[in-house]
């Protein structure tokens, strides 16, 4: 990236939007990777002067391009989230301050304060926002932040974004599917919840949208690692404190319907072989061909119960799709029987 920035980042009067947009897309992705690494590996990561200089030059180039091309650039790069917080002078100062704070909080980062102060002068000659570096309290920046109860969510969000970028960089759809299948089994549902809540203006929205549809397709068809994904979902919602976050992700256009399709498919296959007294699937049940390895009965029963509670945003949708099925009355009987356990 150092060589790319030195050789390619030249912005003159002859440059058009078509010329700079590919560079901006590349820089935005790279800066996001850098920010994720800094935030997740802060105490271990040791930055080099060349990397710091490249990060500052990349930020300056992005500011300058937006100054020239405005909203058209943000639209072309799908980078509204970046430019929405760095359009005005005050916003750019805040972005620069956050960049510097991240740098000095890394391993031995206090040594970079002098470099940042030295480098800001030629930058400020072009963009006055860089003068904010003169006002920074480096010692205060190094102080550990107070505990933030939302930090766990932030960690999940960062993990989700790294995961999305890694999967979507793979060269073929088959490789992407294989990586996604493995991730669905290994990664907790709180991370996938962030995937379904990633806003439209995010610069990885297109990749998130692709993975969301891949997950929903697997659920609706009962293929892939549905077992692991729904098991992790069960572990998440088994904690009542997580219910509101779970309901929030169900405003996605496809996720509720896909979950319902999986659950209906499960009950259609297993209900005829369910011993409700022992709460077990009998031994004469046929092997599942259309539904991937089934969840434990207690888990699928709880998820079904949860989606049919009065608090569920997809309750009516679930009831409507259940009505045509012969097993519906048996399912309602089962849920009524176990309702006291979940109340």
Image (spheres, rainbow, N blue to C red):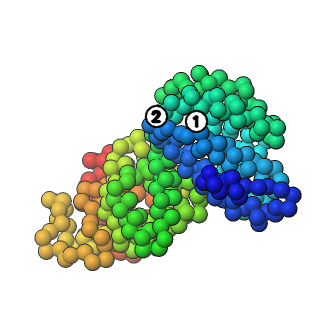
Circle 1 residue = 103
Which is nearer the eye, 113 or 83? 113
User: Residue at point 74% right, 40% down?
Assistant: 92
Which is nearer the eye, 145 or 293? 145
- Horizontally, residue 219 falls left or right of residue 203, namely left
Q: Quadrant of residue 304?
A: bottom left
Position of residue 95 measured from the top left corner of the image (x, y, whole percent): 68, 39
User: Residue at point 24% right, 59% down?
Assistant: 296
User: Residue at point 56% right, 44% down?
Assistant: 35
Asked if disc 2 and disc 1 are in contact, CB closer than 8 Å, the reply is: no
Task: Give the total number of marks visible in the rendering.
Answer: 2
Q: Which mark is residue 43?
A: 2
Q: Which mark is residue 13?
A: none
Position of residue 248 measured from the top left corner of the image (x, y, whole percent): 51, 51
Q: Where's the N terminus, which quadrant?
A: bottom right
Which is nearer the eye, 151 or 102? 102
Does 40 appear above or below 298?
A: above
Element type at marker 2? loop
Residue 31 makes an appearance in the image: yes
Does 92 appear above or below 28?
A: above
């Amino acid at each position: 990236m150092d060589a790319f920035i030195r050789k390619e980042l030249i912005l003159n009067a002859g440059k058009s939007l078509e010329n700079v947009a590919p560079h901006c897309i590349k820089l935005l992705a790279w800066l996001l990777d850098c920010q994720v690494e800094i935030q997740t590996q802060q105490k271990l990561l040791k930055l080099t002067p060349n990397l710091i200089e490249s990060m500052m030059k990349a930020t300056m180039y992005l500011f300058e391009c937006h100054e020239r091309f405005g909203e058209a650039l943000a639209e072309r790069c799908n980078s509204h989230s970046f430019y929405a917080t760095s359009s005005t002078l005050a916003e750019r100062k805040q972005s620069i301050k956050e960049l510097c704070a991240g740098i000095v909080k890394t391993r031995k980062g206090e040594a970079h304060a002098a470099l940042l102060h030295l480098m800001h002068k030629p930058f400020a000659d072009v963009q006055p926002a860089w003068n904010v570096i003169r006002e920074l309290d480096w010692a205060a920046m190094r102080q550990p932040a107070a505990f933030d109860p939302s930090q766990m969510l932030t960690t999940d969000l960062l993990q989700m974004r790294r995961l999305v970028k890694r999967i979507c960089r793979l060269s073929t759809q088959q490789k992407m599917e294989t990586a996604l299948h493995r991730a669905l089994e290994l990664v907790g549902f709180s991370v996938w919840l962030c995937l379904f809540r990633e806003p439209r203006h995010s610069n990885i929205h297109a990749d998130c949208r692709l993975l969301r549809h891949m997950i929903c397709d697997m659920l609706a068809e009962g293929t892939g690692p549905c077992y692991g994904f729904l098991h992790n979902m069960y572990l998440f919602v088994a904690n009542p404190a997580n219910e509101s976050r779970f309901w929030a992700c169900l405003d996605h256009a496809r996720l509720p319907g896909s979950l319902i399709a999986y659950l209906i498919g499960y009950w259609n296959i297993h209900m005829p072989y369910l011993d409700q007294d022992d709460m077990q699937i009998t031994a004469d049940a046929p092997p599942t061909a259309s539904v991937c390895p089934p969840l434990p009965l207690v888990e699928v029963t709880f998820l079904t119960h949860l989606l049919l509670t009065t608090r569920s945003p997809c309750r009516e949708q679930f009831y409507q799709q259940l009505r045509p099925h012969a097993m519906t009355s048996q399912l309602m009987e089962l849920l009524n029987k176990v309702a006291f356990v979940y109340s």
